[in-house]
Image: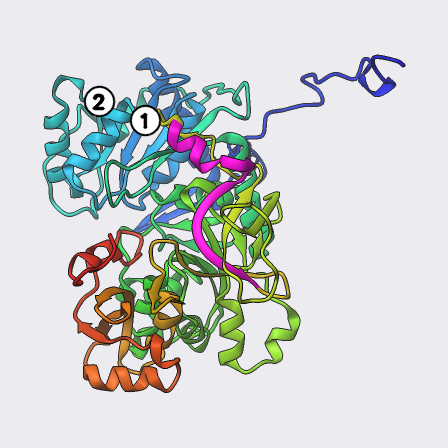
Amino acid sequence: MRSTHPYQQGLDKNSANFVALSPLSYIERSAHVYPERLAVIYGERRQTWATTYTRCRQLANALQARGVGTGDTVAVMLPNVPAMLEAHFAVPMSGAVLNTLNTRLDAEAIAFMLQHGEATVLLTDREFASVVEKALAILGDKRPFVIEVEDDLAPTGKALGDVDYESFIAQGDPQFAWQLPADEWDAIALNYTSGTTGNPKGVVTHHRGAYLNAANNVLSWQLPHHAVYLWTLPMFHCNGWCFPWTMALVAGTSVCLRRVDPAVIFPLIREHAITHLCGAPIVYSMLVHAPAALREGIEHIVQGLIAGAAPPAAVIEGCESIGIRITHVYGLTEVYGPAAVCAQQDAWTELPAEEHARLNARQGVAYPLQQAMAVLDPETLQPVPADGVTMGEIFFRGNIVMKGYLKNPVATAEAFAGGWFHTGDLAVLHPDGYAQIKDRSKDIIISGGENISSIEVEDVLHRHPAVMLAAVVAQQDEKWGEVPCAFVELKPGSQTTEEDIIMFCRTLLARFKVPKRVVFGPLPKTSTGKIQKFVLRAQTPGAKN
């Protein structure tokens, strides 16, 4: 038997037939093919793709001149401003890894991330000066070199930088001959998960995955060339779901936005004919419940991508009613943001709006370039039956899965046990092959031996006309062990009572699933709009933590 076959002889990889996949190639192409098309709009600022590419090359070269290179970390503490977009290209062009910091974290958390990720450079904005100053003080003489991003639209704050951003960029070569990574498996980004207990874990992603998921966004959303995208999603969150790189792929226009505010968003949609935006359910809830007068004059359909906590069908239905056509995606930091999509079927459009929204609220199927998404028994890793009832855990496998957790081999091994990435999200598989999350494993309520999905109860609560947001956690009960406890945030100007909420739920839920207690008030949220259930559990008698 021959040791090699003909297809292994003289048919090796070489520079003509193999190039490492990296999203950096996207900006190079757009700057060449569409140099005069707008890449960035921010306030009065207008910036073309040619200019954006030049600035990225300058920043990359200036970073290299400071000794930044392969294996180094450059952290950024920035809102959705042009410098944040530029960093997504310039930092990996320098060979370094981009660490986008959650701008709502406290000084201790920021200091931990800067220290754990060994950041040598930090780009920051004056809006976050009070937190960053404390974090730098904690680091002492191990603080990184600080670049101050100047912004006339920023709130006043103390300047902390060793140099300002524009002066630093000016030091770089506009014709800097950057190189693609030697290996597409090289790290491109470091993103910390928001830990509710202990320190957060550092998720390391690679150039190949970022390239593929940026393309996935185009395929799954049918994103056209030259889309006009409004940055309602934080770029620090999973690298903006890879959309900085996606917008370079389609030579689109990024309309930057410092904070989410319907009074600002709707005028921008009207002025710039925004075609696409992304966000968590809370973002869309704010838009749905904003005064109707803000939407006057907007006659075109806006495409919206929704993810985060499982979105209530009522929010999806509400978006459709105000001209935002929703596509539902699902993912985690460990899979570059969205890695699954509720791919809509033509037949759904013939269904009543409520039923259409219910189907569209499912987590769906794997992204086209993700190898697999499955609902498996977490113990045996065998597929659960596609009956819409049997609970399993969602698992991912493929190129759009992280390299692992930085400096944490134990957590990495646990996450990849059995050759799959374990999400911790409990779901059922429907007969049509679509997955639907029922809960996080820690959020399931076990009442009298029966499992209650907090998401199912929340979905009903969101249908109450006075409810804007709702979250359900387990409350200890002497008879049943656990019962649902609801936390409800009302729409502005609305009023209701605990009794009314409970009676409403009884009309739509089995009696044992109805909340036994309702607490009214603002719900604690993360910077990406996810409700912080661990905070609510701390306020609930006997709740699981």
Relative height, residue 254 to residue 168 (above, below): below
The secondary element bearing badge 1 is classed as strand
- Amino acid found under the numbered disc labelled 1: Val
Q: Which mark is residue 74?
A: 1
Q: Nearer the viewer, residue 545 or 65?
A: 545
Badge 2: how crowded within 10 Å, few (<14), some, or many (20+)?
many
Q: Is residue 413 magenta?
A: yes
Task: Point out the tag, 1 or 2, that comes first from the N-terminus.
Answer: 1
- Amino acid found under the numbered disc labelled 2: Pro
Judge from the rendering whether residue 242 lies leftward or rightward of residue 14; answer left or right: left
Badge 1: how crowded within 10 Å, few (<14), some, or many (20+)?
many
Q: Is residue 495 visible?
A: no
Quadrant in which residue 239 is drawn: top left
Judge from the rendering whether residue 252 lies leftward or rightward of residue 510; answer left or right: right
Total labels drawn: 2
Residue 113 drawn at (x, y percent): 25, 31
Q: Is residue 35 visible?
A: yes
Q: Is residue 259 magenta?
A: no
Q: Which residue corresponds to the image point at 28% horizontal and 77% vertical from the top-left?
A: 467
- Image quadrant holding the N terminus, namely top right
- Chain part drawn in magenta: 410-429
Q: What is the CA distance from the residue labelled 1 to the residue labelled 2?
A: 9 Å
Relative height, residue 183 to residue 535 (above, below): above
The secondary element bearing badge 2 is classed as loop
Q: Residue furthest front?
A: 479
Judge from the rendering whether residue 376 lies leftward or rightward of residue 151; answer left or right: right
Q: Nearer the viewer, residue 141 or 76?
A: 141
Q: Which residue corresponds to the image point at 49% horizontal and 36% vertical from the top-left?
A: 417
Q: Which residue corresponds to the image point at 24% horizontal and 52% vertical from the top-left?
A: 545
Q: Which mark is residue 144?
A: 2
